[in-house]
Image (cartoon, rainbow, N blue to C red):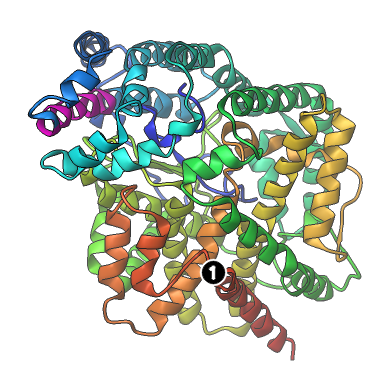
Amino acid sequence: MTPDFFPQKTPFPQKVLSPQKPGAADAKPASAELGPLPEWKLEHLYPGMDSHEFADDVAAMEREASAFATTCKGKLAALAGGPDGAKVLFDIIRQYEAIEDRMGRIISYAGLIYSTDTTNPAHGKFYGDTQEKVTNASSELLFFTLELNLLDDALMDRLMQAEPLAHYKPWLVDLRLDKPFQLEDRLEQLFHEKSTTGRSAWNRLFDETMASLKFDVDGEILSLEPTLTRFQDADEGKRKSAAMAIAKTLGENGRLFTLITNTLAKDKEISDRWRGFEDVADSRHLANRVERDVVNAMVDAVEAAHPRLSHRYYALKAKWFGKDKLEFWDRNAPLPKVPQRTIPWTEARDCVLDAYKGFAPEMAAIAKRFFDEGWIDAPTRPGKAPGAFAHPTVPSAHPYVLVNYLGKPRDVMTLAHELGHGVHQVLAGPNGALMAPTPLTLAETASVFGEMLTFRKLLAETKDQAARKALLAGKVEDMINTVVRQIAFYSFERRVHTERRNGELTTEKLNEIWLEVQAKSLGPSINLSAGYETFWAYIPHFIHSPFYVYAYSFGDCLVNSLYGVYQSADPKFVENYFALLAAGGTKHHSELLKPFGLDARDPAFWQIGLKVIDGMITELESMEG
């Protein structure tokens, strides 16, 4: 794949992952309680893996990439410096964008096929072979962005002001931010081509290993997701059994996960060192188009809030359970004496669409297409990718959403979350393949906002005090998982990548770092007993996208602030919100937030979002009587 600090410029559209949530999936088939569950229609992309349409597109991709390189490589300076440079460069970029769109369609299809059953050898081979072909073809294009950045700054400043090239000005300006970190062409090509046997191969090893692991839970052999689901069981014995099963299996595979972690951390260190990044997370900040001091301010604010957020909430929850401390397997347990029910798929669909419609009918109309046109895959199946994601594919097609629907309240929230991503991706699509992708920090805006709309609707309709308390507690837990826990994950990654620079880390050292960071974030009311030290090993974000996790905290705090503006009845809020989503990757976060009177560079900004969580905990405390 392309250098990992350029995710927004790769022809591999990045699926937007959800934060890991216990209870998001089960391996059991859909029950009568859930009703029929939709499966996505990938024939919208291609009729099948062996179809002539797919083969023809692969051949066209290879042919067009080669022709593009022949026509343009080494000639951009002369072409751009001619009398009609702006028009010539515009036409060249249009050709490049069209090739990238075709590449994106091809690799998206292969990736989505693979995610339906990661244990299927035919799917794995198809994905691996396709990835290799796309990587080879995109190597032909690698020169283009590098050569664009070598053009004279004064010339580019002049050309970008002229039509029709002004259309691509946001992309060109954004591209030039990477200029200090790009390498000589042949080095870039080497990094690029070796990625299929490097980072990508280790990612695939992790995925296939996780999909094949089995967990013995009281004699029942399960995969990871249904084992995590047991953490949502009302029976404490089942929660403990699941926790011990995970600890045992992860512990038995500790050497492999340690090797994967060490290898990928070293791989990143090599890339960072050659490119000149100073801090271990600077490449992610650049990709997210967010300043290091903004992220540091957010981290400092969240960590300073531990006592009044996570520490305080878990002490309250321990009291509800009649304990001095909760065991780690009780952290996300349902509240005692609250009836649990299965939510049918149709009810979940209507709940989310009604919540979206209450905000803006246009938003609900876009989300409804996902249900009506086969853009969602909801059933749980053996080998299916765990968790949930929204995949944008390419602007010439449409996004797809994957969930593992079990009928729990958290599953409804996950559906609302992923559809938020989907709506965002649809609205940003008209910007084209180069400018539709959104930095991760802003990519979480629509998802978390959609989740908040759905939660507020459910809460307003819940009159029973016990049910309302359970719903509110669930939301607080989700927000702690999204804000506090993801920053703890970020801190863990920082420790791991920093210490890896001094040599390989043992499994024992990784376990030690994990426990130190978790104890700090969760507080004294959570007992991190034996077994929990291995739980770092199953977090996919550490493997697939180093330092991805802080984007969740950014998005949650941002949405809490946005929701406050919305509640203040700002008459232009909906208009401004849709403009934010439709901007895709064409504007910096400071420009997008300005119409709402918000500024993420202000340290006080983060307190707005954290106070929302604080207020919900206060409301829960008031329910004690």
Which residue shows up at 72% across the image and 48% down it?
491
Give neighbour class at mark 1: few <14, some 14-19, many 20+ (Cα, 10 Å): few
* Start-end of magenta stretch: 86-102
Q: Secondary structure at mark 1?
A: loop
Residue farthest along the bottom direction in this orientation: 625
Which residue shows up at 29% across the image and 19% down it?
48
Q: Main secondary structure of the magenta part?
A: helix
Which residue shows up at 20% across the image and 45% down it?
430
**Does residue 459 lie above or below 334 as drawn?**
below
Q: Is residue 146 magenta?
A: no
Percent of width and height locating residue 291: 53, 52
Which residue shows up at 72% across the image and 52% down it?
488
* Residue tagged 1: 602
Q: Is residue 435 visible?
A: no
Q: Is residue 94 magenta?
A: yes
**Does residue 278 lie above or below 406 as drawn?**
above
**Does residue 137 lie above or below 586 as drawn?**
above
Nearer to the camera, 418 or 350: 418
Nearer to the camera, 318 or 280: 280
Specify whether 615 is left or right of 347: right
The quarter in which the C terminus is drawn is bottom right
Percent of width and height locating residue 63: 22, 8
User: How many tags in the picture?
Assistant: 1
